[in-house]
Each structure stands twice: as C-alpha cells, then as structure tokens.
Image (tube, rainbow, N blue to C red):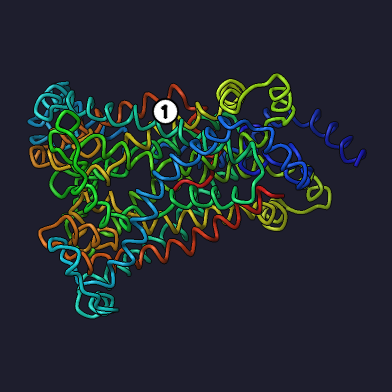
Amino acid sequence: MSTATATRRTEGEADAPGRRRKLTPLRLLLHGFLIVVSLTWLFPIAWAVLTSLRSYEYTAANGYVSFGGWTIDNYVTAWQTAEFGKHFLNSVYITVPAVLLTLFLASCVAFVIARFSWKLNLVLLGVFTAANLLPQQALLIPLFRLFTEVPLPEFMSDSELLYDSYWGLILINVAFQCGFCVFVLSNYMKALPRDLYEAAMVDGASIWRQYWQVTMPLCRPALAALATLEVTWIYNEFFWATVLMRTGDKFPVTSSLNNLRGEFFTDNNLVSAGSVLVAIPTLVIFFMLQRHFVRGLTLGASKG
Amino acid sequence: MSDLPLIQADRAVPPPAATTSKGGRRRRLRLLSRTDRVVITLMVLVPLLLVTGFVWLPAVATVLLSGTNWDGIGPLNEIEFVGARNYSDVVNIYPPFVPAVQHNLLWLAALFVVATPFGMFLAVLLDKELRGSRFYQTALYLPVVLSLALIGFVWQLLYSRDQGLINAVFGSNIDWYGDSNVNIWAVMVASGWRHVGYIMLLYLAGLKGVDPSLREAAAVDGASESRAFFRVVFPVMRPINIIVLVVTVIESLRAFDLVWVVNKGRNGLELISALVTQNVVGEASRIGFGSALATIMLVVSLVFITIYLATVMRENRE
C-alpha cells in the first residue's frame, strides 16, 4: 500500500507538468473528437438561435443556407401573437408554488425517515420513490375523471373544477415530484451526524425545531440543487398541462407552444424565435446555477 | 465526493438503526411529547395522502377499470365487468397497438444500444480531466435542460421538408416528421441527442466515485486502459449501470412529448403512451380500453421500478 502511494506521488509529480506539454497524437485526436462532438451537440440550438434572427422574406428568397436578413422582428412578432407574457406568468403561477410545496413536503417525510429508525421507513421510501417513476399516462384515466369531478369555488378556478385550474396542475406536479426529493433528501439527512439531535434533545428542542432549525439549514446545498432541478422539470412539464388544461389562455408556456404552432406553422423563423423564448428561462437557470443543476441530477441518479 | 450522497452518503456514518436496541428505541419514543408525535404523524401523513391520492390510487383504479366496459359517461353503478375482453381487443382489433409496441421497443433499443454506450464513452473520455473538458461537458448536457416538447420544435428546423436544413444541404425532399417510414427514426435521433448528455452525466458521477487505488493497482499490474476499464472500473460501477439501465427503460416507455408535438402520435409515430392519451382526451373516450393499454405500461414499468428500488436500497443499507 505504502509503495503504491509512493509510486503514485512520484509519478504524479513527474507526470503532471509533463502531461500538459506532451501533446501526443493520441491526445490531439481525443481533443479533435471531443470538439467535433461538442459542436455537433450545440448545433441544433445554435441553428435555432440563428434562424430566429433572420427575416422570413430573406430566407424564403435565398434559402436558409445563406447569409443576411438579420432582424429581431421575429421575437417581437412571436411575443405579441403568442402572448408569451401571459404564458410565462402562467408558468410562474404553477412552478413557484409547486416547487416550494414539493421541497417542503418532501423534506418533512425525508426528515422522519432519516431521523427515526422504524420498520416502515423502507416501505415509506419505496412508496414515494416508485411513485416518481411510474409512467404518467398510466394514471391519466382515473385522474382525468377525478379532476373533472372535484369542484372548486369560483374564486379559486373559473372552471369551478380541479380540471383546467392552476391548483390541479400544482397538486399533480407536487404529488409526482415528491418522490424524487424524498429519496435525495433522506439520503442527505442520514449522513448528518446523530450527535446534533442528541444535543438538540438535551436542550429540549421539539421535533419541529429539530426539523426546521437544525436539519433544514444543514440541508441547504441539497435543497438548492433540488430546487434548481425541480424548477426546470416543472417548467418543462408538458404532459399534465396538455391533458388537464382546456383553456388555451391558462396553459403554461411549454405546453402553449404546441397550441400556438398553428399560427406559426409556415414560418420556421417564428417557430425558432418562440422556441428560444421558451428556452431562455431554463438556459439562464442552467448557466447561473450549473453547479447546482449538475449536482442535483447526479444526487438522485434516478430521474427519468 | 460530497457531491454524490447517493452512493456514498450512508457509508460516512454507521446506520443508527444498528446501534439502537429495541429497548432503547422504545425509550426514545417515550421521550417524544404528544405534540411531537402529532407533528411527526402530520409530517408523514400529509405528503403520503397526496401521493396516494394522486398517484397510487389512480394506478390501482387504472388496473380495475381495464376490466370494465365503462365509457366514462354513464353512472358508476352501471359499470359491467368484461374480464379480459379489453386486453384481447387491444391485441386483436386495434391496428395501432402492434406498431406502438414495436416503436417503444425500437426506442428502447436505440437508446440502449447507441445513446447509452456513447454517453458512457464520452464520460470515460471526459473523466481524464483534459483541458477544456468543462466546455465539452457543458455542450453535451445542454440539451438535458430543454423540455422534450421544445426539442421537438428545435429539430423541426432541421427536419422540415421545405424549410429544414437537412433537405437544403443535401438537396433531398424528405418530410422527416411527416413521412411515416422515417419519422420514428427522426424523433429517436432528437431523443437520443438529449439522452446522451444525461447518461454522460450519470457515468461521470459514477466514475468519480470509483476508488482511484483500484485503477492504480490495475495500471501497476500492466493492464491496458481499456482492459482496466472493462475488467475493473465497469464492474465496480454496477449500481450506476443498473440505474442507467432502468432509467433508459423507463424513459423509453414514458416517451411521449416528442411524438405528441409532432403529430399526436399518429401516422408512423404510434407509442403506447400516446395511444392511452388519444383514447381518453380524444373524441372517443374509451375508458376501459384505454385503461387496458395503460395497465400494460404500468406492469412493465413496475418490473423495472422494483429492480431499481432493490438496487438503491441495497446500496443505501451497505
């Protein structure tokens, strides 16, 4: 063991600076390959941005493989005809409460699972985690029926039903995403030192205080990673909004794109401007919170 | 390393259960005040009711409804049980069913045979911590932040017959999304584009968790790099491999958004998920029939969910 460590150290010292300088043909090939793959991967997104910045008249006359016709009119037109402002707001109404509620409820369950060692813990964890992996379409039929049966007062939903209301979408997103967060948070909480709770108990802290004032502050990194991930997932959610909403005006922005395609369909420049507009919030989150985003994805290593 | 509590977290601290004897546990329970017990119950019960009510009960109801002839309109007490008739109808007299199963399997095969190994290969390359590997990584997992519905739109810019890039460059005249012979391949490419980045990320995390001394030992023994990977590193990553397998199966079973934005899952793009949706929200609301389709999805996914849970639970207990 000690020899292995020693070899590693000498090797590392001799190698590290040398490795950088020594650009063997193999390494050059590797970089070339990775550059080609990366650019290929970026290409569809870059192409969408490029297309969105050109006028339809110019590309119609000269073809898309040409240069010129630069304009931002597509964005203005897309924003106005598609009423993106309204749909973004709908997404906010659904995403913000859903993410907060998911994190709150999931952290409660995770805390109990991690804090106490009861026999039912494993079952509980399974019930939540598996729920997140079921195919949504397999639940659609009873849920669709349920949503059209449950009445809501008019001030909550102008459809007076859970169907076609923000409440319904918030609830179903929370129910579906809870499992993933319970799984990740309970793992995270189990790794916290037990002494904390013993000290808290000696101080006479109630369970709620142990959860809210001891555990939750320590979970900030995990919560940040999960919040980033859940915001993108719920914002990107397409299926539930498509099937559980009827009024086009109330669609969140991801699902509204499909509704609006009819207005766009002959004009790819407009389609691309609309796509870029819808992608902007997730791209901003991604570039600002990349570390959290990546950590969140690998934290669970489970999300489909 | 602390970035990856999934596999590592519980090893950092010995599991508390092992040290708590039965008597000790009971004593601890008694230490809880009545308020504490009410709080604990609420903390579990509220989320549990939500998940049961919106996920598990509907799942059970789907299975029950698949044995009935309910049309979704009549009163519940007029429901008749028709046994397995819906299932035999699905298989025998529903033309889109067989193509849908084929497409789902094709989807799985494409993700599993092409996208997953490619993602793993990229992860191995990026794990070498080359200069600029941050750029490569970012480029590769950028599609993962986009919704699949949006990806459908973005790729339309390449696929469209009259305005698409592919036809413009190659002078072809193929309607990639519209032609029922090629559109399933076109959407699978778009789906694979996203999947590769996701798999790469999972394996990158997995590779960082592999004990470096294992690789050194292999190197000292004179094993070549690829040999060391397949004989030493790959087997150690077994839990990640199983997770990736299950994620891939579930993802190809749940595939929906892409085909729905293209043509609502018709004309060459039939998938089971789309057929279920068509049978419920479309003009014809054939509840029993749609439920039979949904139950098939449910059963297949539960098999893999069980494998998944068994894997992660075992990992966590170790």
Q: Secondary structure at mark 1?
A: helix
Residue under the point 79% across and 51% down: B218
Return the residue at label 1. A286
Query: In the image, B308: left or right of A176?
Result: right
Is the residue A284 above or below the residue A1 in the image? above
Q: In x, y percent, where is residue B192?
A: 39, 51
The type of residue carrying mark 1 is Phe
Residue under the point 89% across and 35% down: A6
Q: In x, y percent, where is residue A38?
A: 44, 38
Residue farthest toward the front in the current orientation of the protein: B34
Q: In x, y percent, where is residue A147?
A: 22, 47
Residue under the point 65% across and 32% down: B2
Is the residue A182 above or below the residue A17 in the image? below
Q: Chain of mark 1?
A: A
Residue A17 visible within the image: no
Quadrant of residue A53 within the rendered picture: top left
Residue under the point 26% across and 70% down: B99
The quadrant of the rendering that contains the N terminus of chain B is: top right
Q: Disc count in the image?
A: 1
Is the residue B200 above or below the residue A214 in the image? below
Q: In x, y percent, where is residue B64?
A: 32, 67
Query: In the image, B297: left or right of B178?
Result: right
Question: For this rendering, which residue is in front, B222 or B216?
Answer: B216
Disc 1 crowd, CA 10 A, few/some/many (<14, 14-19, 20+): many
Query: In the image, A155: left or right of B113?
Result: left
Residue B170 visible within the image: yes
Question: For this rendering, which residue is in front, A41 or A145?
Answer: A145
